[in-house]
Image (cartoon, grey):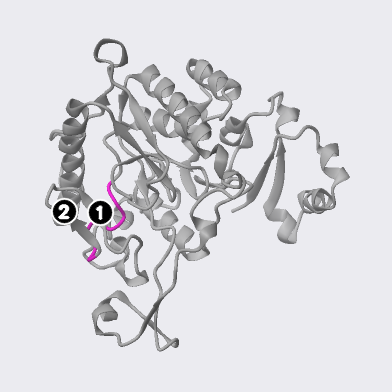
Amino acid sequence: AEVVLVWNGGSMKELEDDNTGKDLIRLHNMKEGPGGKFRIFVSEEHGLPNNLMNRYHPAIAPKTEAVLFFDDDGPWYSADAVCEGFELWRRNSDVQVGAMMRRIDFSSQRQQEEQFKQHQMSIKIAEQERNFLFADVSSSEQPQHIANCQANAGEYVEYNYRETTNPFLAQVALPSGSFVHRDFLCFLWHPALEQIRKYILDHPTHPDDISVSIILSQLTGKSPRVYSRFFHKIKRDGKNIVTRKQFNNRDVINNVKTPESTMHRRLLWQDQSSIHVWANLREEALNMVVGYFGSVSPGSIGFCLGAEAHEKNAEGINYCKPKFLFPDDIPWKKSGGLENSRCESVFNSSSSSLF
């Protein structure tokens, strides 16, 4: 494994003017120790302008098949959460796997009804794999993307930036904490998508996250997956950690709140007065990218599917209660749990493949 810093700020010499930059260069030049696992990818040296899409450039040539991304201003997650995200990715390396998700809301009743239908099918297929391990579901009906008819029907999509905790029905993964197979990088930089990359570069919000998630879902025909970016830890009398199994038997509960640093990007949310302007611009970008392809995936199945935390309301809407998992509630870690045996069956060689 290695850490790659994608530097869009000019030449390597620009880093020498900063003490932190000097430390990074020192690590970059080291051949052994911590520096042997760190390198700087200087975009300018590869003829690339300052562009958020550079982090997905195949010239980076990642050493590992799984590529984990983080923005320079976070949010940041615990090692335990990221490791569980990696385990979910190992079982679903043909899609993007994220931690902080965004939902796309549809404007028309037709789209909303179709999304509900297709999402229920996604859940059914996931449960079939658990009940009949690797039963052939490839020949059966598969979930379809939801058409977005902007010109003829006046349909549009809304960017839901405030709903960050429901892992169901999400279509966009924010970069921090997201996993992508390295084989996807060449598709993201394919000449056929030059218009999209130019739009990302020119738009005020530089919507690389929206574009990458939409492109990958179009490429795979599937929705992204999502892992719990935070684990609930409950204390009894301020001492012992209480698991979910003991949840209803506790006497005194002090529930640890979700750290603010895991909820959103630090720099983006400093100026609250600009959030609505930013959201409107993001929605504009979303409609452009969705309009370019003409459809959207039905959305993710939540990380609590197959766990005790999985709930469904009277309207059939799925959600997790509590919103994040307990450490002992991760389905793919339980014997007989959802996707528990999938990794062993799929990745049975020293080098896993994308498909």
In the image, 162 versus 100, the foreground residue is: 162
Q: What x and y, as percent, mark residue 132?
A: 14, 53
Q: Badge 1, how many Cα within 10 Å: few under 14, some, many 20+? A: many
In the image, 88 versus 178, the foreground residue is: 178
Q: Which mark is residue 264?
A: none
Q: Magenta span: helix, strand or loop, mainly?
A: loop
Q: Would residue 44 be counted in the magenta stretch?
A: no
Q: Type of residue at label 2?
A: Asn
Q: Badge 2, how many Cα within 10 Å: few under 14, some, many 20+? A: few
Q: Earlier in the sequence, mark 1 or mark 2?
A: 2
Looking at the image, residue 145 sits to the left or right of residue 217; the answer is left
Q: Is residue 194 visible?
A: yes
Q: What x and y, as percent, mark residue 258?
A: 45, 64
Q: Type of residue at label 1?
A: Tyr
Mark 1 and mark 2 in contact? Answer it, CB < 8 Å: yes
Circle 1: element type: strand
In this figure, which residue is indicated by the disc labeled 2? 313
- Residue 237, quarter of the rendered image: bottom left
In this figure, which residue is indicated by the disc labeled 1? 319
The residues colored magenta run 301-308
- Residue 174 vs 37, above or below: the answer is above
